[in-house]
Image: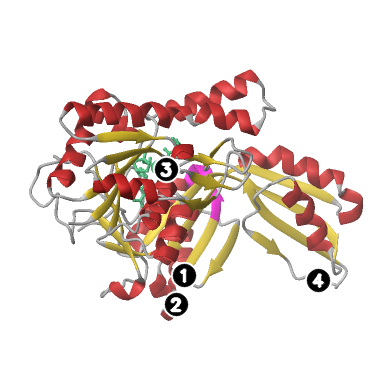
Amino acid sequence: MARIVMKFGGTSVADMDRIRNVARHVKREVDAGHDVAVVVSAMSGKTNELVGWTRDASPMHDAREYDAVVASGEQVTSGLLAIALQHIGINARSWQGWQIPIRTDNAHGAARILDIDGSELIRRFGEGQVAVIAGFQGIGPDNRLATLGRGGSDTSAVAIAAAIKADRCDIYTDVDGVYTTDPRIVPKARRLKKVAFEEMLEMASLGAKVLQVRSVELAMVHKVRTFVRSSFEDPDAPGMGDLLNPPGTLICDEDEIVEQEVVTGIAYAKDEAQISLRRLADRPGVSAAIFGPLAEAHINVDMIVQNISEDGSRTDMTFTVPSGDLDKALRALNESKNTIGFDVIQHESGLVKVSVIGIGMRSHAGVAASAFRALGEKGINIKAITTSEIKISILIDGAYAELAVRTLHSVYGLDKS
Ligand code: ADP
Ligand code: ASP
Ligand code: MG
């Protein structure tokens, strides 16, 4: 007997037929004698609709009320799945975040989980009860609903798995695992059997939305055995209930991966904007003068490139922000123009950041050069480059996004043969 957390995303619970299908997946694990906690997302499209309503009500809405509205999608699916499970004879009960409780910090709309009390869930496993938990939500220090940021049900699931010391956390979605790149963009993408935590962290933070970044961080810190797998396969197909090697992709420590490729995957993030500040005074404190006001405006700055100044007096600074934050960033910079002391601001939106990721890069030379050569041969101009030990990120014009992803995917030999 094992303890398993099963998380089902929006497309997996999109309507009653799919919810009944999810109930069959749950029944399979219950029938095998396991303790089961299920975490559900809202029906696909629901959260977007709810977010739209809050914007319609007021563009400058109160974050606590945003949370009260957008958390409701998961309340519906958790109740419906509990009913569907009861209908097929399974003892199930729904749980909202506050009932467990899942305690978060006060950052409404993007709250972090601080603590989960798993004792009542565990007590009820002893009575043979299945817990159906609303993902994406918890309760803040102000005793109000708090949501965990978009895609946050993944994080709910991994955090619950850590709290109840589950043997496994299965993230069921509309693809049958983590691929070398988004399989919707590159049909030749290959499914990976295993991905190291560090690589998954980079892939998720560089745009692969298959797992929320925070969920990977938690899985890494708490050593949660996390599988990404499909809810669309027949729940009773052979091997689906395999305890140690279920179908899908295992996210694990790098030393569990025997044959490590140099490059594991390609990720991309659309809707990036670039800002350049021209002819800045090249003096101590100038970076703080630029990025301080942007941080205060809660703008997430990404690729930062500063030129070495030619004469020691003036330099240029270029960086990227999400396109949606461009106006806010320009406003913040212009308000601080006197303290920063730049000549002009230039900006461009509609860019895309394409990233090559792999822990094998640590010990291989020439990985970046191959990317630059391949993109050059396709006539794709590179606007900015940043690197870390295990990734290279390249900023290009949005129109070339798919071409660049496909090109890099084949250059590193990731295409399915
Ligand atoms: P859910 O609603 O189940 O949480 P998401 O839409 O959040 O599902 O995540 C699954 C999607 O992630 C897939 O449909 C796929 O298009 C996308 N995706 C992006 N990059 C990858 C990747 N490298 N491997 C698998 N899926 C990916
Ligand atoms: N329903 C939420 C969202 O769409 C959380 C999730 O699905 O993970 O962002
Ligand atoms: Mg998701």
Distance, label 3 to label 2, CA atoms, is 32 Å
Vertical placement of residue 401 versus 308, above or below? above
State how far apart marks 1 and 2 are (Cα). 6 Å
Secondary structure beneath dot 2 equals: helix
Going from the N terminus, do you reach mark 3 or mark 1 first? 3
Please tell me how crowded label 4 is: few (under 14), some (14-19), or many (20+) other residues with Cα within 10 Å: few
Q: Residue at x 31, y 40 (%)?
A: 131
- Nearer the observer, 203 or 121: 121
* View quadrant of ligand 2: top left
What residue is disc 2 on? 362
Q: Which residues are magenta?
A: 395-400
Could you tell me the amino acid type at mark 2?
Arg
Instruction: Report the Cα–Cα distance between label 3 and label 1.
Output: 27 Å
Query: Which numbered tag is attached to residue 153?
Result: 3
| Residues at circles 1 and 2 in contact by the CB criterion of under 8 Å | yes
Q: CA distance from mark 4 to mark 3?
A: 50 Å
Of circles 3 and 2, the one toward us is 3
Quadrant the N terminus occupies: bottom left
Left or right: 290 with respect to 45? right
Disc 1 marks which residue? Answer: 390
**Quadrant of the image for the C terminus?**
bottom left
- Amino acid type, callout 3: Ser
Mark before the other along the chain sequence, 3 or 2: 3
Q: CA distance from mark 2 to mark 4?
A: 32 Å
Classify residue 184 by image quadrant: top left
- The label on residue 310 is 4
For discs 3 and 1, the disc positioned in front in the rendered view: 3
**Dot 2 and dot 4 residues touching (CB under 8 Å):** no
Q: Position of residue 244 (x, y in %)?
A: 18, 61
Mark 3 touches mark 2? (CB < 8 Å): no
| Mark 1 surroundings: few (<14), some (14-19) or many (≥20) residues within 10 A | some
